[in-house]
Image (spheres, rainbow, N blue to C red):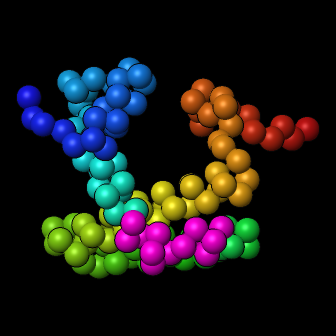
């Protein structure tokens, strides 16, 4: 059994509470990605302060769309075979995480029934 750092242990605990075990396909990669995101937070928050993120969020989603599209375009151009292309995907993820945290702070948490959402859920009923 590999040794885990403190952030990894907390991630595993949260995953176990959600019913995900170490044997679940993809679980190890999820832990690695989340630990990477946690480890990056000090640098990210220095470069992109919370107040700046929240200001962009309150202005609408255009800033975030442009930023996320740039990372995907860069990954596409550099290809995922290259470390730089994979880094662009990592930056896309970190930016998405920053957006979600900002939305959570400025507008509140996602719907409590979000886990039951499906593509077939009626969001707006038009008569």
**Which residue appears at 25% of the width and 66% of the height?**
86
* Residue 92 appears in the picture as rendered: no
Between 39 and 74, the one lying in front of the other is: 39
Magenta span: 42-54
Q: Position of residue 29 (x, y in %)?
A: 24, 43
Q: Position of residue 109 (x, y in %)?
A: 66, 43
Q: Along the horizontal axis of the image, is 104 left or right of 124?
A: left
Between 89 and 38, the one lying in front of the other is: 38
**Which residue appears at 42% of the width and 24% of the height?**
18
Q: Count the marks: how many?
A: 0
Name of the residue lying farthest toward the right: 127
Image quadrant of residue 17? top left
Q: Is residue 109 above or below residue 94?
A: above
**Which residue appears at 73% of the width and 53% of the height?**
107
* Residue 50 appears in the picture as rendered: yes
Q: Considering the image in quadrants, where does the N terminus appear?
A: top left
Q: Position of residue 20 (x, y in %)?
A: 33, 25
Q: Is residue 115 magenta?
A: no
Between 9 and 34, the one lying in front of the other is: 9
Q: Position of residue 9 (x, y in %)?
A: 28, 35
Q: Considering the image in quadrants, where does the C terminus appear?
A: top right
**Which residue appears at 37% of the width and 71% of the height?**
43
Q: Main secondary structure of the magenta part?
A: helix
Image quadrant of residue 123? top right
Name of the residue lying farthest toward the front: 6
Q: Along the horizontal axis of the image, is 7 left or right of 104?
A: left
Q: Along the horizontal axis of the image, is 121 left or right of 78?
A: right
């Amino acid at each position: 059994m590999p040794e885990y750092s403190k952030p990894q242990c907390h991630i595993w605990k949260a995953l176990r509470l959600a019913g995900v075990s170490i044997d679940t396909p993809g679980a190890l990669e999820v832990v690695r990605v989340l630990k990477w995101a946690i480890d990056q937070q000090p640098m990210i928050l220095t470069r992109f302060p919370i107040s700046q993120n929240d200001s962009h969020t309150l202005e609408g989603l255009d800033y975030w769309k442009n930023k996320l599209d740039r990372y995907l375009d860069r990954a596409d151009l550099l290809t995922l075979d290259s470390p730089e292309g994979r880094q662009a995907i990592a930056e896309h993820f970190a930016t998405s995480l920053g957006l979600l945290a900002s939305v959570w702070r400025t507008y509140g948490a996602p719907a409590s029934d979000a886990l039951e959402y499906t593509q077939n859920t009626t969001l707006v009923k038009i008569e």
